[in-house]
Image (cartoon, grey):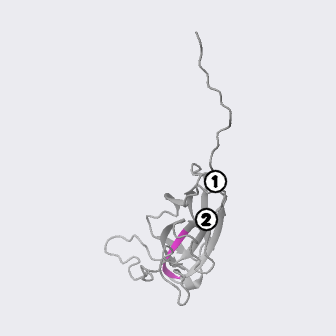
Amino acid sequence: MSLSACLVTSSPSFEDPEQTPPFLIGPTAQPTLHEIFVVDRSGPSEFPFSARVVSEDAGQDVLGRLVLDYGVPLPGPEIPFQEVLDDTIVAASTIDDESRTLTTQWYPTDETLGCHTVTLFASHAFNVDTRCPADPKDFDSLTWTVIVCDSVMAPCCDPTPPPGEPGCADLKCPEVDPTARCDSAQ
């Protein structure tokens, strides 16, 4: 009786994994994306925004950027939002690592009273001129609707009022320009 055997004469070679765009997991977002977030400036001075991120990073860190009023461009340069609120970094990892969370902070000012959107971007690089992700195919984003008030000056409106009450209906969010986007900005 003979046994067949296989003799390996060299080590297998493995290629490095290809980098993928970051993906923000919406159900992990804080605050939740399903409700209007009311920020009362008379309370805490900072408000965190976060979500878990997954990607194959090929050794490059994931960058997070929080912006105000995405789709409402500044006059002049082609920046498709009003202001960068915060930047953060999450260490590079692999696609199967679901433990990483991008967390940014916002410190609202008197100028931000009213209705806004706050958008969290995740990318491997940002363009210095447009402040958008450097590669329009290498990013993901999540957007919250936020009402900023100051209950010392006036009561904050209720975004989920009982039937027949106005709630926040008199607040107008800035009008979004559908062409002012980071995936079209160069």
Q: Residue at x 55, y 68 (%)?
A: 121
Q: Secondary structure at mark 1?
A: loop
Total count of labels: 2
Q: Residue at x 62, y 48 (%)?
A: 15
Camera-side residue: 147 or 62? 62
Magenta range is 113-120
Q: Quadrant of the C terminus?
A: bottom right
Q: Earlier in the sequence, mark 1 or mark 2?
A: 1
Q: Position of residue 99 (x, y in %)?
A: 60, 51
Residue located farthest toward the left when viewing the structure as drawn: 164
Q: Amino acid at mark 1?
A: Ser
Q: Position of residue 28 (x, y in %)?
A: 52, 57
Which residue was labeled with disc 2?
124
Q: Is residue 19 above or below residue 46?
A: above
Q: Residue at x 65, y 27 (%)?
A: 7
Q: Position of residue 110 (x, y in %)?
A: 58, 84
Which residue was labeled with disc 1?
93
Q: Quadrant of the N terminus?
A: top right
> For residue 116: magenta?
yes
Residue located farthest toward the top when viewing the structure as drawn: 1
The quarter of the displayed image where residue 108 is located: bottom right
> For residue 178: magenta?
no
Camera-side residue: 111 or 122? 122
Q: Is residue 128 above or below residue 51?
A: below
Camera-side residue: 63 or 168? 63
Mark 1 in CB contact with mark 2 (< 8 angstroms): no
Q: Residue at x 56, y 87 (%)?
A: 77
Q: Is residue 36 in sight in this rendering?
A: yes
